[in-house]
């Protein structure tokens, strides 16, 4: 197992949030809940703003051994010193992003169909995300829900770490893991949690057998 894969195998719950709208202690409470990775997604923000937000979070993440991923913006990822970049289908091509962020940082890519997933396996990415598994309100124009079948299909085609995303809650997370996902990305379930640390622990408990 490569060092990159060993690093990714530490991940379980993968919170995604916007530092501009999240409560001030959101990242700290995620860390206290035990997460090993988090992603900042700042749609519409300038590279300088994303870079500043990532730099502000990095000391807390480094101290706790948490990987910090930047969504969409390769330059912000490289300039901030973040641990990785996650791309959507409409973002920069993975090969171009890899040139910007370098060989050592993690690179992820979202897919929403079998064709997109197959194409992703030929790209210089470390981790592929599949979704939205269920209906989601975290995007203005979400892709159609793919259900658990696409996760099962994808799992049979790769040994790479597989991320599931989209409308996943504490009620459905075990079904998603049983379908073959290694990592589960969550947005809404954490954003609406009355007790964030408790919700993180409840969701992460799904990996305990």
Image: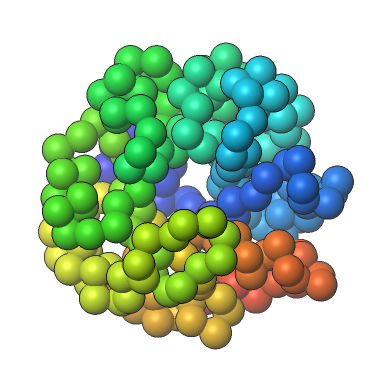
> 130 or 14: which is nearer to us?
130
Q: Quadrant of residue 142?
A: bottom left
The residue that appears at 66% across and 57% down in the rendered structure is 34
Number of residue marks: 0
The residue that appears at 29% across and 29% down in the rendered structure is 94
Q: Position of residue 122 (x, y in %)?
A: 14, 38
> 166 or 60: which is nearer to us?
166
Question: Where 110 falls versus 135 (above or below)?
Answer: above
150 relative position to 182: left or right = left
> 29 or 120: which is nearer to us?
120
Q: Quadrant of residue 107?
A: top left
Question: Where 176 falls versus 124 (above or below)?
Answer: below
Q: Position of residue 23 (x, y in %)?
A: 83, 51
> Which residue is most to the right?
24
**Residue 162 in sight here:** no
Question: Where 43 falls versus 25 (above or below)?
Answer: above
102 relative position to 94: left or right = right
100 relative position to 123: left or right = right
The residue that appears at 46% across and 73% down in the rendered structure is 135
Question: Where 7 falls versus 209 (above or below)?
Answer: above
Q: Position of residue 183 (x, y in %)?
A: 43, 59
Question: In what quadrant of the picture does the N terminus appear?
Answer: top left
> 154 or 158: which is nearer to us?
154
């Amino acid at each position: 197992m490569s060092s990159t894969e060993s690093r990714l195998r530490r991940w379980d719950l993968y919170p995604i949030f916007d530092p501009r709208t999240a409560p001030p202690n959101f990242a700290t409470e995620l860390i206290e809940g035990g997460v090993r990775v988090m992603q900042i997604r700042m749609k519409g923000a300038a590279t300088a703003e994303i870079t500043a937000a990532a730099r502000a979070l990095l000391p807390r993440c480094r101290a706790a051994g948490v990987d910090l991923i930047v969504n969409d913006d390769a330059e912000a990822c490289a300039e901030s010193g973040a641990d990785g970049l996650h791309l959507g289908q409409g973002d920069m091509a993975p090969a171009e992003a890899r040139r910007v962020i370098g060989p050592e940082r993690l690179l992820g890519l979202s897919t929403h169909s079998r064709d997109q997933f197959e194409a992703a396996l030929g790209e210089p990415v470390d981790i592929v995300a599949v979704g939205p598994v269920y209906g989601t309100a975290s995007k203005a124009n979400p892709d159609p829900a793919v259900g658990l079948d696409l996760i099962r299909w994808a799992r049979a085609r790769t040994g790479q770490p597989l991320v599931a995303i989209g409308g996943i809650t504490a009620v459905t997370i075990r079904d998603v893991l049983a379908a073959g996902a290694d990592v589960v990305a969550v947005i809404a379930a954490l954003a609406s949690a009355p007790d964030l640390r408790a919700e993180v622990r409840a969701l992460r408990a799904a990996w305990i057998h």
